[in-house]
Image: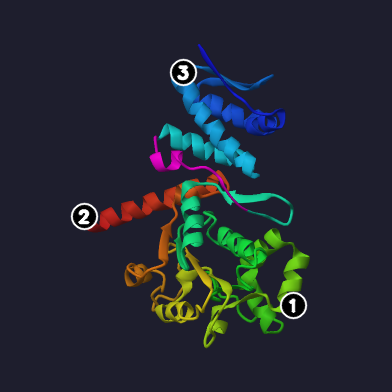
Amino acid sequence: MAMKVIPVSAEEGIKLLGQLNQNAKQIDAAFEVESELGAHGLIISGDEKNINSAEQIYLKLLDGIIQGADADSQLVKYLTNSSIEHDVEDMAFSPDLICINSKGRAVYSKTAGQKRYVDAIRDNELTFAIGPAGTGKTYLAVAMAVKAFRAQEVSRIILTRPAVEAGEKLGFLPGDLQMKVDPYMRPLYDSLYDLMGFDTYQKNLEKGTIEVSPLAYMRGRTLDDAFIILDEAQNTTPEQMKMFLTRIGFHSKAIVTGDITQIDLPNSYSSGLIGIQRVLQNVESIKFIHLQAKDVVRNDLVQRIILAYEQADKKKKNKGKS
């Protein structure tokens, strides 16, 4: 039996092992090794090849901890699965710190797909993120916007989405216009509250440096020196998509997010998100990122549900072809 020691402080070692040693239990079970905290660091015992695999996981977690990220069980599962499946890109991934939220917790990319997404936002004026629910499309976009706003790289944040009902007719909604559109904007509010805190968000809202509004309000405007996010873009028509993209002004950065498997437009309308990649594929400073089920960072059940839907869609397409 071989043994390897990763030199870490006691505090780092405790974080690596996880709450109630949950991280160590996952890694030990995946690679048939034993992990424990010793006087000189984290000790891994077992077959030499398995030790090297486990060490790789711990070093990636340690890299994230040093940056301020959490070594949570979800990240451990992602890294161990990537190692077992020998996914080269995913195995090369390390957590990437984005910002600190209002509760003092680190916000960071948790998968290789999310890392590509964050890098694309940094390097391009316009980024499209297309993928299933739970992959962090909206939250990471808002996190990058908040980071740029705090660093004074932009003077305002503008968040918008089409006010389309998700397969239901809600009927008449009471109150003024703002109260009517608030339910559609709630996911964007939630992200801002978590990242900025309610008081900071409210102050900036009153000053006009943060704006959350329906897509229809964007017509006729030119948005300079702003971080602009169009959420739920699968529910835009091609005309609305063109209208939004031509709002981008000087010194601005834009992100478009959407899930083309959850289109709520009436049958007579086509989604503006589906054909846009063909239209803009050769335009400079535009990047398309496609997130997948393995990038889901919600409850494991969500990932399994998405995979089940993907398999059902494949069977349906194959049946149609035959």
For image coordinates 63% across by 40% down, the residue present is 66
Q: Which mark is residue 48?
A: 3
Residue 264, can we see it? Answer: no
Please state the horizontal and vertical placement of residue 86, each as a whole percent of the image: 39, 35
Residue 238 location, quadrant:
bottom left
Q: Which mark is residue 206?
A: 1
Query: Which element carries disc 1, helix, strand or loop?
Result: helix
In three-dimensional space, the C-alpha distance between marks 2 and 1, rounded to whole angstroms, equals: 59 Å
Please state the horizontal and vertical placement of residue 318, each as a whole percent of the image: 27, 53
Q: Nearer the N terminus, badge 3 or badge 2?
A: 3
Q: Is residue 283 above or below residue 307?
A: below
In three-dimensional space, the C-alpha distance between marks 3 and 1, rounded to whole angstroms, equals: 60 Å
The residue at the far left in this view is: 322
The type of colouring in the image is rainbow
Residue 281, can we see it? Answer: yes
**Residue kind at label 1, given as amino acid type:** Glu
The magenta-colored residue range is 86-98
Q: Magenta segment: does it hold 93?
A: yes
Circle 1 crowding by C-alpha within 10 Å: few under 14, some 14–19, many from 20: few
The residue indicated by pointer 2 is 322
In this picture, residue 185 sits left or right of residue 134: right
